[in-house]
Amino acid sequence: MIALDKIDKQEKGIEYFETFIRYIMNARNDLELKAVYDMAKDISIERSDVIMTIAEKLIKEGMEKGMEKGMEKGMKKGMERGIEKGKWEEKREVARNLLGLGVEIDKIIKATGLEEAEIKKLMN
């Protein structure tokens, strides 16, 4: 029974310590995880394992968040490019239709914003 109490207290201590490390990492922008590793080396072996485990967990979480943000950013950029390409294709279609109606190139340039060279490509 005493051993279970000791384990429970130790786990709570680790949770509190992890919360403390998270607070320090968030509060101090200049503190890197390498510094946490270095501090862990200076502490007793038993406790340094706990700190190392927490630091590794924080690194993993940071990497996961970074990947998630990167994926979101990539998807957003891809969508923006797709929208831009769609707009460009739409302008080309309008220019094609105007050419079919016999509208002068200078008026098509004003209507679509396309360059003269692009409109001439559509004529072929």
Image (tube, rainbow, N blue to C red):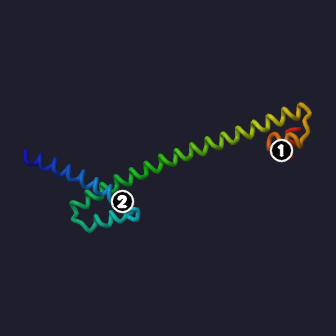
Q: Position of residue 46 (x, y in %)?
A: 21, 60
Camera-side residue of 101 and 110: 110
Pointer 2 with pointer 1, Cβ within 8 A: no
Residue at coordinates 26% horizontally, 68% vertically from top-left? 42
Q: How many marks?
A: 2
Q: Find numbered disc 1 in the image and state the secondary structure of the residue it sits on.
A: helix
Mark 2 vs mark 1: which is more N-terminal? 2
Left/right placement of residue 41 relative to residue 67 reads left
Q: Position of residue 3 (x, y in %)?
A: 10, 48
Query: Where is residue 45, by image quadrant?
Result: bottom left
Extreme residue in the left direction? 1
Local crowd size for mark 2, using a 10 Å CA cut-off: few (<14), some (14–19), many (≥20): few
Residue at coordinates 36% horizontally, 59% vertically from top-left? 27
Q: Quadrant of the N terminus?
A: top left
Which disc, if any, is residue 118? 1
Circle 2 or circle 1, nearest the eye: 2
Query: Where is residue 80, by image quadrant?
Result: top right
Q: In the rendered view, tell whether residue 122 sits above or below residue 8.
A: above
Which disc, if any, is residue 51? none
Camera-side residue of 112 and 20: 112
Question: Which residue matches tag 2?
Answer: 27
Q: Where is residue 38 in the image (x, y as percent from the top left)?
A: 32, 67
Say what amino acid the circle numbered 1 marks: Glu
Left/right placement of residue 107 relative to residue 11 reads right
Q: In the rendered view, tell whether residue 37 sits above or below residue 58.
A: below
Q: Where is residue 59 in the image (x, y as percent from the top left)?
A: 38, 55
What whole-number distance in Å separates the C-alpha atoms at marks 2 and 1? Answer: 54 Å
Say what amino acid the circle numbered 2 marks: Ala
Camera-side residue of 64 and 31: 31
Q: In which quarter of the image is the C terminus?
A: top right
Local crowd size for mark 1, using a 10 Å CA cut-off: few (<14), some (14–19), many (≥20): few
Q: Find numbered disc 2 in the image and state the secondary structure of the residue it sits on.
A: helix
